[in-house]
Image (cartoon, rainbow, N blue to C red):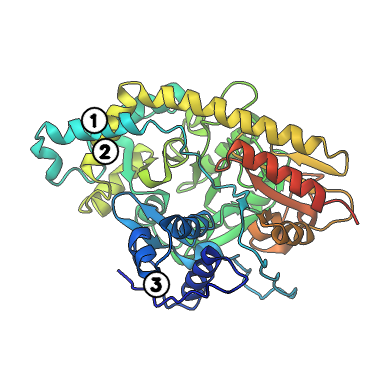
Amino acid sequence: MKELTLFLEPGSKRKLYEQIYDYIVAEIRAGRLLVGERLPSTRSLAEFLSISRSTVDLAYDQLQAEGYIEARPYRGFFVCHVDNLVRIEPEREREEKPEPEPKVPFQIDFSPNGVDMSLFPFDTWRRITRNTLNDDRLELFLPGQPQGDYSLRHTIARYLHSARGVQCEPSQIIIGAGNDYLLMLLRYIIGEGRAVAMENPTYQRAYRLFSAMGFRMCMIGMDAQGMRVDELAASEADVAYVMPSHQYPTGVIMPIGRRSELLRWAAQKEERYVIEDDYDSEFRYRGKPIPSMQASDHSGRVIYIGTFSKAIAPAIRISYMVLPEALMERFHSRCGFLSSTVSRIDQATLNEFIGNGYFERYLNKMRKYYRQKHDLMLSGIKRWGTNFIVSGEHAGMHLLVTANNGLSASEMKLRAATMGIRVYTLKELTIKEESIGLPAGLPVDRTVVMGFGGLKIDELRAGLRILRSCWKNS
């Protein structure tokens, strides 16, 4: 555990929790607090500083909300990866000056990655975990199968078939600790020297991983139906990474016609594949759920990836990948010696949580709750008038807001930050500006991304009220 040599200034104009917040942020950014380092508990730090524990709690809550630290159950608070907190610049340096840091900590964060845990059935999860350990199941403490336990893979296969139309056997599923691990594993399965196509803007974490693994990156433009297949065909790519059910961050839902085009592209040559990232397909607010692209794949070219981080909890860290049967042979020959990265106790708990219907009941409850927040945010922004246009509103846990009153996205972000509110510009989520291709009417320089998943109802109302005031054209 890292001890903090922190000294407070009781007579300062800054509040005590702000002093703690500023000190820890500075230590992280300077590299004096390293990634994965454990911070003192709130109780011990409060005793050391001779202040109330609630003051330390407030500082830690703010740090956690902004992504500087994370709470790990029963272990404490740990420093997050700094890379996750800063904007990725393209290969060439941007000419514009960096945006100034806000003078106050963010009180409301419209993060598109937020998850609400207030309705999570902790008692149920605790009871399942306790019963799992009370049964003296020795096998859970022994090494399991590299793909993950068969019982959980069987349960996931049944769930995916009923909820997403995925056609697979348990033998085609690989369970891993997060999508990062599965994408890194995929490198050894499909081999090196690949050219990966991604939409722009896109999920930057996946872009970073592919780049770090040595893949050649091809940024493909978008239209109102998603990735442009004509640009894809003209590129050197042999792997296409898409999010057809709800593209991140634009919110575009890929229609069946475009999906068929992608599948035809993949089937035209050997060793072409489509990676379907179905990261938040559980949350759709208009119409029936759209079947997965994998459900229409008859050539064995779709690699389907999903996670329980959005639908259950980020700390669960259990994701799954469905491979075509031909690629499973490569997995066994190239990666069969690897151990599963997910605890067998966690696998057993999740298996019972899904298999006994708790997950479905919780998911139905969260759909209604997120729908309530989605509708509140959508109606609130629409009341601002024609100066602001909302898009990407049919699924997921974020919306896009485009200003038509002369404000740029960077100005919107700066004005919000001065009021203690954090929003995200669409430009921050692009890779190479010269290859941006967006649906008509979605200008990258006037659009911000706003999530509602992690905010409470009263925070949403307060945040929208403040933004309406500070985004008025002066």
Asked whether disc 2 touches disc 1, contact meaning CB atoms under 8 Å apart, the reply is: yes
User: Where, by quadrant of the figure, is residue 134 drawn?
Assistant: top left
User: Where, by quadrant of the figure, is residue 263 drawn?
Assistant: top right
Quadrant of the snapshot with the C terminus: bottom right
For the residue labelled by badge 1, is the local secondary structure a helix, a strand or a loop?
A: helix
Q: Which mark is residue 34?
A: 3
For the residue labelled by badge 3, is the local secondary structure a helix, a strand or a loop?
A: loop
The answer to whether residue 212 is visible is: yes
Q: Amino acid at mark 1?
A: Ser
Quadrant of the snapshot with the N terminus: bottom left
Q: Amino acid at mark 2?
A: Gln
Above or below, 463 against 87 in this view is above
Q: Amino acid at mark 3?
A: Leu
Disc 2 residue crowd, few under 14, some 14–19, many 20+, Cα 10 Å: many
Residue 460: x percent and y percent? Answer: 65, 40
Residue 415: x percent and y percent? Answer: 76, 59
Q: Which residue is mark 2?
A: 347
Query: What residue sits 74% from the left and 39% below the top?
Result: 391
Of callouts 1 and 3, the N-terminal one: 3
